[in-house]
Amino acid sequence: EHPEFDAVRCNLVPGVGELFVMPTLTTSGRADILFWEGIPGGPLDAFQGIKDPSEHLAKTLELMEKFTPWEYARATKVELTDANGTLAGRYAPTVRKPIGRLPGGGLVLGVADVVVANDPITGQGSNS
């Protein structure tokens, strides 16, 4: 650990997914985002139908206790930053053909997010 730095922590769980703990600033101050990325159909694919933010947080903590107990131990005083402080969804990665033909017949080369679109995790796309 490096308490003098705010940094994203990435916890890889083979065959299951990843838990990211990301420092952020909210309207109520500093917070850490608890962000699961799961393999479709796997044990982390458990948020469908959960609409209540407190249930969402409870499911997040349940999964943390099971798959990342070291992070769960750090989250003993966790609470939502606001009443709508949750988000769940899916993003299917896309890979496109990198070469396109212009109306005049010339070729164009696509780069970065135009060619590869993936879940940005910490806000970065394929433009790196």
Image (tube, helix red, strand yellow):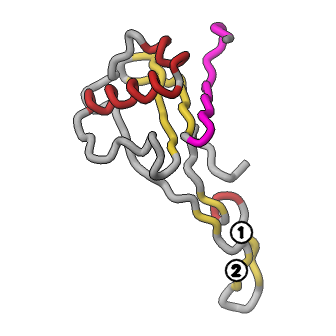
* Circles 1 and 2: CB atoms closer than 8 Å: yes
Q: Is residue 8 above or below residue 75?
A: below
Q: How many marks?
A: 2
Residue 99 appears at what percent x and percent y?
74, 77
Q: Residue at x 48, y 36 (%)?
A: 36
| Amino acid at dot 2 | Gly
Determine whether the residue tagged by mark 2 lies in a helix, strand or loop. strand
Q: Tell me which label, 1 or 2, sits earlier in the chain.
A: 2
Q: Residue at x 39, y 24 (%)?
A: 61
Left or right: residue 114 versus residue 32 is right
Residue that mark 2 sits on:
100
Q: Quadrant of residue 9?
A: top right
Q: Residue at x 37, y 39 (%)?
A: 87
Front residue of 12/103: it is 12
| Disc sitting over residue 87 in the figure | none
Left or right: residue 114 versus residue 79 is right
Magenta-colored segment: predominant secondary structure: loop
Residue that mark 1 sits on:
110
Left or right: residue 113 versus residue 108 is left
Q: State the extent of the magenta-drawn residues as a range.
A: 2-15
Q: Quadrant of residue 115?
A: bottom right
Front residue of 121/124: it is 121
Residue 6 colored magenta?
Answer: yes
